[in-house]
Image (spheres, rainbow, N blue to C red):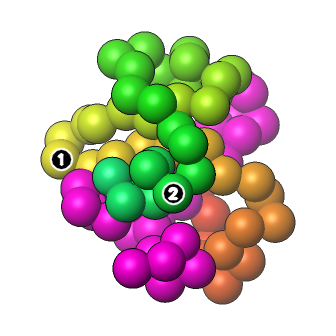
């Protein structure tokens, strides 16, 4: 599976940091993280500020650019 084939379930905008956080299913998120050299963390702040991802409620949360996945409506 290539990164362009992986689609997040949803994307939320963190209004405090103005960053876009994509929520992937577990296995898609792990694959996306590997292909994009993301590293695991337990701290949300590192997801926002660094090249990291975290697991929350079975989803993989990864910061994406606002120009990524334009077909997915963002929520706050």
Q: Secondary structure at mark 1?
A: loop
Residue at 49 percent of width and 84 percent of height: 5
Residue at 47 percent of width and 21 percent of height: 44
* In-image side of 13 versus 22 (left or right): right
* In-image side of 64 versus 38 (left or right): right
Magenta-colored stretch includes residue 67: no
Callout 1 crowding tier (Cα within 10 Å): few <14, some 14–19, many ≥20:
few
Measured from the top left, where is residue 17 in percent x and y?
73, 27
Magenta-colored stretch includes residue 21: yes
Q: Find the magenta span and give its range.
A: 1-28
Measured from the top left, where is residue 10 in percent x and y?
46, 65
Of 14 and 26, nearer the camera is 26
Q: Is 76 rendered above or below residue 69?
A: above
**Residue for badge 2:** 35
Residue 13 in sight in this render:
no
Q: Residue furthest left?
A: 58
Q: Measure the C-alpha gap from mark 1 to mark 2.
A: 20 Å
Of 30 and 66, nearer the camera is 30
**Residue for badge 1:** 58
Residue at 39 percent of width and 79 percent of height: 1
Of 35 and 41, nearer the camera is 35
Residue 3 badge: none
* In-image side of 61 versus 30 (left or right): right
Q: Which callout, 1 or 2, points at the residue further toward the start of the chain?
A: 2
Residue at 56 percent of width and 16 percent of height: 45
Residue 48 in sight in this render:
yes
Q: Is 43 rendered above or below residue 33?
A: above
Callout 2 crowding tier (Cα within 10 Å): few <14, some 14–19, many ≥20:
few
């Amino acid at each position: 599976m290539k990164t362009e084939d992986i689609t997040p379930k949803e994307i939320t905008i963190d209004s405090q940091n103005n960053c876009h956080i994509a929520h992937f299913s577990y296995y898609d998120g792990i694959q996306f993280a590997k292909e994009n050299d993301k590293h695991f963390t337990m701290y949300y702040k590192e997801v926002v500020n660094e090249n990291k991802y975290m697991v929350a409620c079975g989803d993989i949360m990864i910061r994406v650019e606002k120009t990524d996945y334009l077909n997915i409506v963002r929520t706050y």
